[in-house]
């Protein structure tokens, strides 16, 4: 699983490291299905503050398409955590829906009585 972190107007090194660690932990059981994760951060209001920190997580699933989740929060880490929570849920749901239907149960076979030739 390859993780790409793109930041704009954020503490890049610390946020990048935290993003990679949290994503690897959250997706550890789903990593075989995920090829690439791209995390993008954007400060919508600039220096004015408020609930304006946006985090977008885009997951490219092996042979199953893309999932994109976008969240907004008052700080970078809250936005990341919310995006990861939603992304993991969407991946699980996507994998469950794309699973082939269960095979039909086998029909019971009726056995005919067999003469074993036990007569003496």
Image (tube, rainbow, N blue to C red):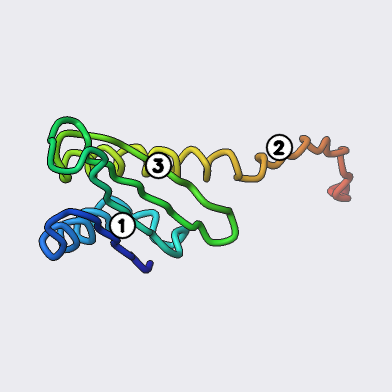
Q: Earlier in the sequence, mark 1 or mark 2?
A: 1
- The residue at which mark 3 appears reads as 69
| Percent coordinates x, y for residue 82 in the rendering | 26, 37
| Percent coordinates x, y for residue 45 in the rendering | 22, 38
- Residue drawn at (13%, 36%), measured in percent from left and top? 48
Q: Earlier in the sequence, mark 3 or mark 1?
A: 1
SS of the residue at dot 1? Answer: loop
Horizontally, residue 96 falls left or right of residue 19, namely right
Q: Earlier in the sequence, mark 2 or mark 3?
A: 3
Q: Quadrant of residue 100?
A: top right
Crowding near the residue tagged with mark 1, few <14, some 14–19, many ≥20 C-alpha atoms within 10 Å: few
- Residue drawn at (39%, 54%), measured in percent from left and top? 30
Horizontally, residue 11 falls left or right of residue 63, namely left
Q: Which mark is residue 105?
A: 2
Q: Nearer the viewer, residue 9 or 62?
A: 9
| Percent coordinates x, y for residue 17 in the rendering | 16, 63
Report the Cα–Cα distance between label 2 and label 3.
Answer: 38 Å
Residues marked 1 and 2 touching at CB (< 8 Å) = no
- Residue drawn at (48%, 58%), measured in percent from left and top? 60
Crowding near the residue tagged with mark 2, few <14, some 14–19, many ≥20 C-alpha atoms within 10 Å: few
| Percent coordinates x, y for residue 105 in the rendering | 71, 37
Report the Cα–Cα distance between label 3 and label 1.
Answer: 18 Å
Q: Which mark is residue 28?
A: 1
């Amino acid at each position: 699983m390859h993780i790409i972190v793109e930041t704009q107007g954020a503490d890049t090194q610390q946020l990048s490291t935290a993003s990679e660690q949290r994503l690897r932990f959250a997706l550890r059981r789903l990593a075989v299905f995920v090829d690439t994760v791209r995390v993008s951060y954007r400060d919508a209001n600039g220096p004015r503050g408020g609930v304006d920190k946006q985090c977008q997580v885009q997951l490219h699933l092996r042979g199953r398409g893309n999932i994109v989740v976008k969240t907004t929060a008052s700080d970078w880490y809250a936005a990341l955590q919310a995006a990861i929570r939603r992304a993991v849920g969407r991946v699980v749901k996507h994998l469950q829906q794309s699973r082939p239907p269960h095979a039909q149960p086998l029909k019971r076979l009726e056995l005919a009585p067999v003469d074993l030739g036990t007569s003496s």
